[in-house]
Image (cartoon, rainbow, N blue to C red):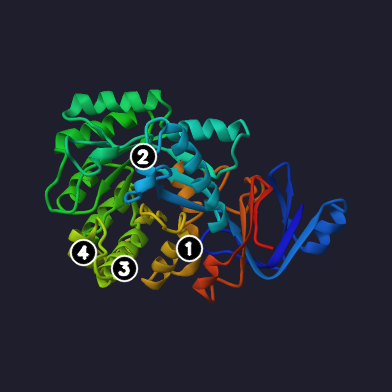
């Protein structure tokens, strides 16, 4: 297949090509060159041309919960079989958002590992999943109802080993809730990072408030999820230590907006309503601080974490739009959603960039996101390993 559009954004944060096409063979990007040259060289290849469009690498969502909807009464009653059907349908919808790779950072035990196996066997057609199995929290901690409760450094280490036995690619801890009271102790956090790294696994941590953020930076977690009240000095420390920030701005901003809409409707509330002030402050904090944090050079990637009923599936485009609106240049925004995410996942040899030898995970957008960020939502075509998995036309 030869695919071409008005412009090609490679994902490296700086390169935009015009009058170039991509030749795909055996699911990989084989060659990039002028359309006429490639067509002459590969006369039997199917040609797909998209005038007025932009070609990019497939997007990466670094923070999803495939089998978890916080306020859905239906999913609360699902047995394991029904949950698997629901989760497979949910994951497949991500293709329509341009998402070809996702990191699930806590769903029900064994769910994501089974979905990986089902996809490999060809039973379901879903994006690439990297997962943490189920998160770990202390007794009664944030997310306790859908996490594994463990206390003390040796229980933490034991739970990490169990998750790895069950197929976890990464690990995930919950270190804070919505107050300035850390949940796990420094000793427990240090043990978690040490055990994961000792066993060759990376580890993410939910840390939105202080002093939990600092404790998790000190421990050396590979990714800090949320980091809502992250300071410039802490971002500099993360940059120096090679730690990665996953802001999930869209989750906080959309939740704030949803609360406000719900409270305006008489008699209608949400489970988050009691935290209205928290989400309002969080939304403002991201808006006020993002550019200064970005300017420290800390590595930033896209994650969504939108876990309520009726939400858009993996709204990476919206997260990217927040990055751009708050001060990150669009080419770097695209890099954060593609190449940088692949690097953090350790998959940069195979995905995340339009380059020869990489998997043909590709997205065609209608329009030009460099001029209009809304174009990020206008997904027209998605290829996953060279196969069409979404076609709006």
* Distance between mark 2 and mark 3 Cα atoms: 27 Å
State the image coordinates of residue 42 (x, y, percent, origin top left): 84, 52
Q: Is residue 242 above or below residue 153?
A: below
Instruction: Tell me the mark number nearer the camera, choosing from 4 and 2.
Output: 2
**How far apart are labels 1 and 4 at the CA level?**
25 Å
* Number of marks: 4
Q: Residue visible at 27% across and 46% down?
A: 206
Q: Residue at x 27, y 31 (%)?
A: 194
| Mark closer to the observer (1, 4) | 4
- Numbered badge on residue 77: 2
Q: Residue at x 39, y 23 (%)?
A: 165
- Residue 141 lies left or right of residue 29; in this view the side is left
Look at mark 1 in the image and give the residue it sits on. 317
Q: Decide which of tag 3 and tag 4 comes sooner along the chain.
A: 3
Q: CA distance from mark 4 to mark 2?
A: 27 Å
Residue 276 has which mark?
4
């Amino acid at each position: 297949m030869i695919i071409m559009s008005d412009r090609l954004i490679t994902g490296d944060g700086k390169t935009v090509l015009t009058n170039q096409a991509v030749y795909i063979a055996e699911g990989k990007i084989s060659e990039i060159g002028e359309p006429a040259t490639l067509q002459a060289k590969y006369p039997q290849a199917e040609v797909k041309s998209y005038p007025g469009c932009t070609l990019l690498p497939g997007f990466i969502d670094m923070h999803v919960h495939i089998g978890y909807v916080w306020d859905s009464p239906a999913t609360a009653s699902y047995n394991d079989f029904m949950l698997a059907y629901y989760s497979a349908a949910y994951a497949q919808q991500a293709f329509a958002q341009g998402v070809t790779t996702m990191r699930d950072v806590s769903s029900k035990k064994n769910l994501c590992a089974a979905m990986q196996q089902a996809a490999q066997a060809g039973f379901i057609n879903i994006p690439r999943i990297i997962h943490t199995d189920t998160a770990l929290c202390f007794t009664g901690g944030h997310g306790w109802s859908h996490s594994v409760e463990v206390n003390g450094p040796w229980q933490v280490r034991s739970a990490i080993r169990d998750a790895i036995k069950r197929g976890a690619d990464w690990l995930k801890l919950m270190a804070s809730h919505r107050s300035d009271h850390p949940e796990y102790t420094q000793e427990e956090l240090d043990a978690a990072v040490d055990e994961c790294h000792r066993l060759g696994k990376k580890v993410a941590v939910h840390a939105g408030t202080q002093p939990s953020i600092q404790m998790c930076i000190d421990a050396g977690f590979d990714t800090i999820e949320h980091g809502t009240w992250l300071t410039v000095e802490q971002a500099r420390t993360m940059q120096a230590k090679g730690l990665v920030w996953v802001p999930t701005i869209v989750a906080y901003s959309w939740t704030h907006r949803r609360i406000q809409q719900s409270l305006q409707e008489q008699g209608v509330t949400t489970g988050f309503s009691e935290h209205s002030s928290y989400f309002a402050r969080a939304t403002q904090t991201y808006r006020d601080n993002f550019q200064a944090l970005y300017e420290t050079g800390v590595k930033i990637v896209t994650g969504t974490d939108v876990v309520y009923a009726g939400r858009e599936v993996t709204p990476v485009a919206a997260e990217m739009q927040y990055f751009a609106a708050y001060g990150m240049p669009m080419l770097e925004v695209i890099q954060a959603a593609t190449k940088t995410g692949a690097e953090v996942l350790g998959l940069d040899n195979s995905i995340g960039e339009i380059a020869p030898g990489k998997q043909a995970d590709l997205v065609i957008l209608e329009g030009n996101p460099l001029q209009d960020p809304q174009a990020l939502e206008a997904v027209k075509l998605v290829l996953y390993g060279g196969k069409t998995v979404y076609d709006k036309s």
